[in-house]
Amino acid sequence: MKIWIISVLLFCGMIYSLWLSMEIDDAGIITSKRDLEDPDYYIENMVRRTMGESGEVRTILYADLVEHFPSDDSMDLQKPYLQLYNAVGQPWHVKSETGWVSSGNEVILLHGEVEIWRLDSEQKRIIQALTSELRVLPDDEYAESNEPSIIVHPSAVTHSIGLRANFSHNHLELVREVRSKHKNKTSG
């Protein structure tokens, strides 16, 4: 009888141990298929230019380090910096800590602190936006974030939740919970 009770307890202990080990795996020790995959190539100090149909520069993407993953043909970026050119004026600049580029380069996801700005003809910032987790669609000249955002303009600082950028029309839009503080111009 004692041997039967000990056997049942040992069997229950083994089942419990197996269940615990499966819970640990499910908890995220291996968080994605990407964790198991090595990049097939990498590029240091990358510069990639995208041209329009008539040969004009549309975008320039810089990154300190690019790692390419063959399973989905995507790329991870370290310190990406993107310049978006449109038909009018100076390009838009977008910079972040890390990023990801989809296969075909249709989507760029920028992570961490993201900064967007545009310069005037004298190379002074005329507008700046700060946010995080920005989704950029370079072919559409569009970007968006659902995260807290700030737009800094020479005459105002505006806070919101969410940001949309239409680079082709030189337009930034704050989505919700918008609060603005205007600066007074001082006369000299």
Image (spheres, rainbow, N blue to C red):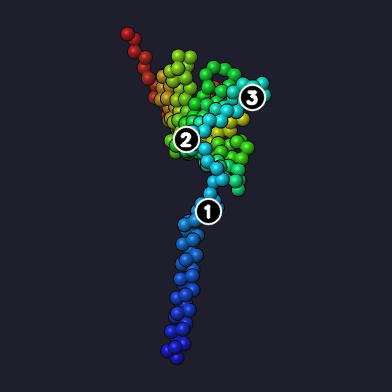
Q: Helix, strand, or loop for circle 1?
A: helix
User: Foreground residue, 142 or 82?
Assistant: 82
Q: Earlier in the sequence, mark 2 or mark 1?
A: 1
Q: Quadrant of residue 97?
A: top left
Say which amino acid is labelled 3.
Answer: Gly
Residue 87 place in picture, x, y as percent: 59, 19
Residue furthest out toward the top: 188
Q: Tell me the SS state at disc 2.
A: strand
Rounded to the nearest angstrom, the CA distance separating label 1 from label 3 is: 37 Å
Can you give x and y, in whole percent of width and height, for residue 164 in the image?
Answer: 53, 31
**Relative to residue 115, is residue 185 drawn left or right?**
left
**Along the line of sight, the residue nearer the viewer: 163 or 121:** 121
Q: Amino acid at mark 1?
A: Leu
In space, the residues marked 3 and 2 are separated at their CA atoms by 25 Å
Give the position of the C terminus as an image quadrant.
top left
Q: Which residue is mark 1?
A: 36
Q: Residues within 10 Å of mark 2 (few under 14, many from 20)?
A: some
**The residue tagged with tag 3: helix, strand or loop?**
loop
**Number of numbered discs present?**
3
Which mark is on residue 64? 2
Question: Badge 3: few (under 14), some or many (20 or more) residues near its Cα, within 10 Å?
Answer: few
Q: Which residue is mark 3?
A: 52
Amino acid, disc 2: Asp
In-image side of 13 versus 69 (left or right)? left
Please determine whether, in this image, residue 110 is positioned above or below residue 166.
below
